[in-house]
Amino acid sequence: QVQLVESGGGLVQPGDSLRLSCAASGLALDFYAIGWFRQAPGKEREGVSCIGSSDGNPYYADSVKGRFTISRDNAKNMVYLQMNSLKAEDTAVYYCAARGGSCRRTYYNYGYWGQGTQVTVSS
């Protein structure tokens, strides 16, 4: 049974940092791309970042480029999203998701999802 569990969310001030973690079980992470998505109230779920199974070239949405960094530790079955210089517009529920093969930018291409972790950026 595949399970993804996010952690690390919280309430922070603008300019602060957070590191989100995604713990995967029931799958061999080596063969999966892991994406981070977020959804704010009243908005569609959007892709934030993705790292492929062999990655060299992770994807970042324009809105987070230069501020967020995705990484993975296949030995620990973990994927991380380091978020720096957080802004109020980063406030959302953040989800990690898995798909076999390479990254895709849209959420409907991912078959496995975590339950989400809330990130709130507010002064």
Image (cartoon, helix red, strand yellow):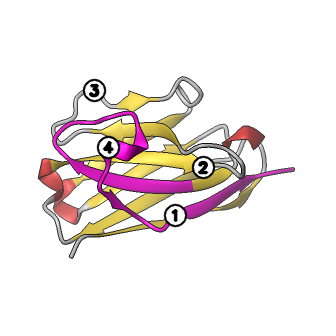
Query: Which one is earlier in the sequence, the residue at label 3 or at label 2?
Result: 2
Residue ID for mark 3: 57
> Left of 99 or right of it: where is 58?
right
Residue 77, picture quadrant: bottom left
Task: Tell me where the magenta segment starts and ends, as one range.
Answer: 94-123
Marks 2 and 1: in contact by CB < 8 Å? Answer: yes
Residue 3 shown left or right of residue 48 in the figure: left
Mark 1: secondary structure: loop
Nearer to us in this view, 48 or 18:
48
Residues marked 3 and 1 touching at CB (< 8 Å): no
Q: Is residue 119 magenta?
A: yes
Left or right: residue 113 compared with residue 56: right
Tag on residue 39? 2
Nearest to the eye among marks 1 and 4: give it. Answer: 4
> Looking at the picture, which amino acid does disc 4 mark?
Asn
Instruction: State the residue at coordinates (16%, 41%).
Output: 101
